[in-house]
Image (cartoon, rainbow, N blue to C red):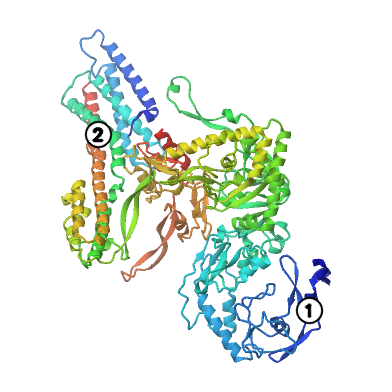
Amino acid sequence: MLIRKSNFAEHYPWVLASIVVLALAVVWFVFASVGHAEWPSGSSLPGFTFGILGGLICLFEFLIWPRKKLRSWRIGKVSTWMRAHIWLGLLAVPLLVLHTGFRWGGPLSTTLMILFLVVIASGVWGLVLQQFLPEKMLKEVPAETIFSQIDYVSELMAAEASRLVRSVCNISSGPDDSDKVSDDAHMVVGAVRTTGAIQGRVVVTSSLQESVPDSRPLFDFFNEHIYGFLKNGQLAMSPLQNPVRAHSMFNSLRTKLPPRAHEVVTVLEDLCNQRRQIITQAKIQFWLHSWLWVHLPLSVALIVLMFVHVFVAMKYW
Amino acid sequence: MNVAEELFPMVVDGRVVELDRIAADLIKAPPVKITIDGKEVEIARATLSKNPITGELKPKLTTILDAAQKAGVFIPILCHREHMEPVAVCRFCAVDIGARTLVAACHRPVEDGMKVSTGATSEKVNKSVKILTELLLVDNEVPRAVNREYGDNELRTIAKKLGMDPHASRFPKNPNDRGTDDSSMIISVDHNACILCDRCVRACNEIRHNEVLGRMNKGFKSRISFDLNDPMGHSSCVSCGECMASCPTGALTNKKLVASNLSEQPGALPVSVDDLFTHELFQGISKPFMEWNQGSVVRRKFKQGEIVCNEGDSGSTAFIIEDGVVDVFLKSPLNHIENTQSSGFLGLIKKFTTTLSTSKREEEKKARYISIDAPVSLNTSNPIAQLTKEDVLFGEMTCMNHYPRSATIRAKTDITLLEIRRNVLYILQRNKQSKAILDAVYNKRSISTHLRSIPLFAEQFTNDKDFEKFVDLVREKANLVRLNPGDVLFRQGDVEDNFYLVRIGFVKIWIKQPGGDHVINYTGPGGMVGEIALMGHLAELQGKLLTQGRTASATALDHVDLVSISGEDFKIILENFPKIREKMVAIALERLTEIQRQIAKVESTNLNDFLKQGLMEARSLLVLDLEKCTRCDECTKACSDTHQGVTRLVREGLRFENFLVASSCRSCLDPYCMVGCPVDAIHRGKKREMIIENWCIGCGKCAQNCPYGNINMQPFETNEKIDDVNRPGYKVAVVQQKATMCDLCESVDGQPSCVYACPHDAAHRMSGTELIKKVESNKN
């Protein structure tokens, strides 16, 4: 969730509430420690209270997962839950530290505290990434597509490009997935278009051209570099992944081809450019969501261990 | 010798008709005797023919066709009708009079002792007519559109009568595609079905005297044309329907915009065409056209106190008051919804409560008039007014542009109304006779409240007497102008002629720039257009105008009604009313500054693109803030979860600065999807969202019409089962489809799930104008 000056008003109530609770907790904790050699432990009244409060917050934090899954339930906007999740989660850190009385305790409580800190750190990491990665994606990936459709879009791109190249080079067979392409006389070339403030990936069709003599180098280049890159992206280990290199390779290809084939080269260059953007999108998407693979399972483990900790603490108090 | 001395008065049907000497002599001459296919017939040399519309009497020489009809002999005719001047272009009525060539019976005057053979007795005539028929049938062999209303195809009827197969011909089809013209709301033109009989041309020019239709091109490319070859909808055609009613082949057809019949709705009483023609308003319209549109006008009776329509309701009809008085008022309190801050600790946490506040902004404290969709405006201090039969019509804006009803209408006495569909209103507004009535009503009754609803004028007068003086001056000078969507009112650089006040609809104001057209603004009801260029002579504006003539261009975005005041009259108004002049100058300077600011920002927000994408029309866009959106797809998943596993939005679309306008129903102000549904199953809901009724037949017309691809056809299995062709012995369910679209979750609880489920506060619903404001505020 993006937190900026412009939208801080929406976070303000949660920040304020967290600061107030924290201030009260610190005052109480300091007050309770006056005249004692050690900080109040988890079993002291303030420590116990902070433990219960922190535990309830952890439980609430965990509940955002089912909340997000129950999308059609009207139990508060998910964005409101998320704000609460962020600020109460951060509040839980000092509360639970106060609960420990600055002691690690036994192996269980030590594990629990480490787990808790890792969960918090992963959450903060995710939050930090959300502050700039969406903006990066906005700026660097105008050809963005839906993440789950990347494989399909890539295959389609490769197949349509193959049809175009074969028609220009007058070659009947070649590397394509014939079931992915239509039989009509046009091929679909996705393109990024900008008019004024509007920008987006639009469907552009290109008519299949009549064959161009002496265009065999295009077919060879396509087979060697483009097809694999369009279809498999990064996995193809193609030099086209580098935009500067790609530009020079396409320029060199143009010198080997008659001018009539240059238009097709431009189309292919544009497709490769879009494919590069999709690779960037996949990378950004990975960083935007990969932290959840740490945050989520550890949160589950944290909740389980928290209940074990509660049970053990109650039993041996 | 003066002209009057040349005329000879005659009494015909109780009326004195003045004829020239030759015509009078012919009418008074003794009858002639001719023989047609062996039958002798005696007939006058000339008669008086009556124009069925104007009642005008004209002398007409008796033709062989007139004689044959009197003798009961069949002669086929196609290009001719008895109330038209014969032109003999189709030669269907060819007969043999023993001359070197065959002659046209519709055109050839009778002569005493003439012997005539028709196709029934002359093989030469019969062969000639059949070849002609065959050739014309080839030209007319075009598929019929399903959503059109066709009259009888007279050509095919004649072919059958001559014993020919109307669909078989030995001749190849004309390879030239002469095209179609669907620009008129009412009439569709298929030039390929036209056989150039000129009946429509004569109907327009001779019968109606509209002088719109003519011919263009030569040879195979010949076709009818409107004005100077303009599209029909953009021409000066008044949509009287006479050409359509005259067309013998279905080249001019009724578009049947609304398939559903109003008379099938509860409380609707049918109205016969004869009944309609007792109303002065309908008397200028072609009778066959009204017969085709019978279901488009119904009568409704309301008891005192009953509600005719509520403000905010969606609708597609207008009402003509036949009898009684209605109250027009606003039910909604004229208050703001405001968030109030709680006191104490809760006060620190803002936006906790929402209440209806009676507070008013400074500009709202003065009483003013609200422009509504009726011949009256409502005063904010007491928003109620009455309409009577004298006001004729209300609900035009809803009917023409599908805007929601702007006020509540309640029967003050027992009332009778005629409810009319858009196609009928369109004709009433364009037909000369009806338009004159409606314009007179505006000039007499509405102009005062319309001017009062324009703050510029209303605020300049401290007493009603001065204001009435102003209204009287404007009344003398005002003309009503109607524009179709896309019509250009004026272009940048044009010589300034008129000043316009917008009554209904929206006008786009734009300028031409090296980088393309640049939209400055759009002006809606209560706005004014074209004043800057007319004030160029004033000292305050000297040297500040950007160009000679018009400083910008103006184009109608939808069906627009304007009040036009000529430049000279506008200058008189400025001279006579210094306060208005002062205010006008201030507005003009402000607008010029704004234009200059816009030009400076050519590279920034492009309103033109904004309009091109139809965003201005949008009432509820799903906008994703791409700086906040983590592409988690929760919005799509939430939509899918809410609507039985099928999402009604796709997180793809065009970006507008940092915002992605996702593919989801925009609840447009003018929803094109509503036009053409054959079962009238797509409507506006309570919150102006689009809803598809359960009687949708899955034809996909709405999905086709939606310019933004936001209606999906969703397949579903029916209870019916059929044999599976791939697996003999097995059965599969029959799959049908229905249209689905975003209904803003109105079917659930009215809170769009996509927005509700977004964890990052990136998804928002907003109107097009709110989006542009947001983009602007982000820039500044």
Residue type, numbered disc 1? Leu
Specify whether B662 is left or right of B245: left
Can you say which quadrant of the picture contains the N terminus of chain B?
A: bottom right
- Which residue is identified by label 1? B26
In the displayed structure, A121 sits above or below B179; it is above
Label 2: which secondary element = helix
Q: For the residue marked with disc 2, what is the amino acid?
A: Ser
Q: Residues within 10 Å of mark 1 (few under 14, many from 20)?
A: some
Q: Which corner quadrant holds the C terminus of chain B?
A: top left
Instruction: Give the x, y percent position of residue B709.
Output: 42, 53
Q: Residue furthest front?
A: B1
Q: Which mark is residue B424?
A: none
Q: Within the image, what quadrant is residue B4 found in?
A: bottom right
Q: What is the crowding at mark 2: few (fewer than 14 residues within 10 Å), some, or many (at least 20)?
A: many
Q: Is residue B268 visible?
A: no
Q: Which residue is mark 2?
A: A299
Which residue is at 44% across, 26% downward? B350
Q: Nearer the viewer, residue B525 or B533?
A: B533
Residue B16 in percent (x, y) is at 83, 68
Give residue B362's quadrant in the image: top right
Foreground residue among B690 and A109: B690
Q: Looking at the image, which residue is at 22% across and 54% down?
A: A231
Nearer to me, B284 or A44: B284
